[in-house]
Amino acid sequence: MSLLRELAARDIDALLLERRHLAAGASGRNAGFLLEGMAANYAAAAREHGRALAREVWEFTAENHARLEEALAGAGGHRRLGSYTLAASAEEERELEAAADLMREDGFPAGYRAGRLLNPRDGELDPAAAVAALAEGGRVVEGCEVRSLEGGGVETNRGDLEAETVVLATNAYTPQLLAAAPIRPVRAQMLATAPAGELVVDRPTYSDWGYRYWRQLADGRLLLGGFRNLAPEEEVGYVEEPSDRIQAHLDRHLQAMGVEAPVTHRWAGIMGFTPDSLPLVGPVPGRPGLFVCGGYTGHGMGFAFNASRRLAGLLLDGQEPPAWMAPARLAWRAPSLLS
Ligand SMILES: Cc1cc2nc3c(=O)[nH]c(=O)nc-3n(C[C@H](O)[C@H](O)[C@H](O)COP(=O)(O)OP(=O)(O)OC[C@H]3O[C@@H](n4cnc5c(N)ncnc54)[C@H](O)[C@@H]3O)c2cc1C
């Protein structure tokens, strides 16, 4: 939707094909955390990718938030209350303190106290409402499944199309159309409660290296998700259904937080993970005219709006997105095998 909006603003004849309905995928199922950075904390990201790249990624996501906030103009349940990252172990506590120090040195406004990192600039949104708010301009065809991209055309359940350019904004589902894509489908589960009578948490909270997350809506309902690390072999693939095992962990966590409000909703969605946890934005190697914009590794709210702007910049103005997003940085199957 973000990309279609960019293209429509430039009067490009673009069509969004969606096999179910808008926000049917992860964008309508997520926790609505609008965070700066990657899944890993700043210290871990700096260790893995180098400090300069960590800084660049954090700046990119800060820009994502600013641009998205501007586009939403108060719609989509957007609030900028800041977020907490809460240590779940002594090791994570040391790491978060180090992360806060590095962030401040690099110009990011992090606070740290007693195992809790505060990012005062982070935000939250109602993701499906945000998608709806962005759905202005551009043509959308719902109930239209792309079945094949082979042979130069686009084959769908509603007929075949010719397109000069095709963008796979299909995140986790990309390998279903392009088996060579270096994206892995990973399931995430959540629950929601009826309004709790009291304030349980005043900011979106992320804990245990990102494996647990919760926030409270303005009307008092609690959203809680995560725990996939406790059943990693099960939390993969394309089954968008919650499991008893993970939901029992979520129930126990709710109890531990002292929340007595009943659970009203339980659900699951599929995230698209890349080997280096960074997105894929740009041309598919060996496939002229085919592009990808996805692989957000559980953080699409924090990346996708700006990633779409960068892809539009490439398609319309020839401006290369940052090299750390280039699909060619990762191993795809040999180009000759792709078609
Ligand atoms: C439970 C959960 C919690 C999460 N929490 C957060 C969070 O708090 N913050 C955050 O930043 N990120 C979060 N994420 C990740 C975030 O939701 C995703 O990164 C983001 O939604 C990806 O957006 P997308 O538009 O690229 O993909 P999607 O929203 O998955 O959209 C892809 C669309 O492509 C359609 N499609 C697929 N194949 C075809 C085809 N062949 N033909 C036509 N259409 C097709 C699908 O139906 C789908 O609607 C979470 C994810 C989950 C599952």
Image (cartoon, rainbow, N blue to C red):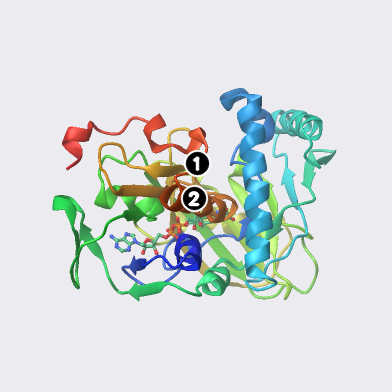
Which amino acid type is marked by label 2? Answer: Gly
Q: Which residue is drawn at 18% across and 57% down?
A: 153
Across and down, in percent, residue 112 comes to 83, 39
Image-based side of 102 in relation to 324, left or right: right
Q: Residue at x 39, y 55 (%)?
A: 169
Mark 2 lies on residue: 313
Q: Of residues 236 and 2, which is closer to you in this image?
A: 2
Question: In the displayed structure, would residue 60 be above or below residue 31?
Answer: above
Mark 1 and mark 2 in contact (Cβ < 8 Å)? Answer: yes
Front of the two marks 2 and 1: 2
Q: Dot 2 lies on which element?
A: helix
Image-based side of 153 in relation to 64, left or right: left
Mark 1 lies on residue: 321
Q: Residue at x 39, y 51 (%)?
A: 172
Q: Dot 1 lies on which element?
A: loop
Which class describes the residues within 10 Å of circle 2: few (<14), some (14-19), or many (20+)? some
User: Mark 2 or mark 1: which comes first in sequence?
Assistant: 2
Confirm whether residue 65 shows in the render: yes
- Report the Cα–Cα distance between label 2 and label 1: 8 Å
Q: Of residues 42 and 201, which is closer to you in this image?
A: 42
Q: Residue at x 29, y 48 (%)?
A: 289
Across and down, in percent, residue 311 comes to 46, 50
Which amino acid type is marked by label 1? Answer: Pro
Q: Of residues 339 and 230, which is closer to you in this image?
A: 339
Across and down, in percent, residue 214 comes to 66, 57
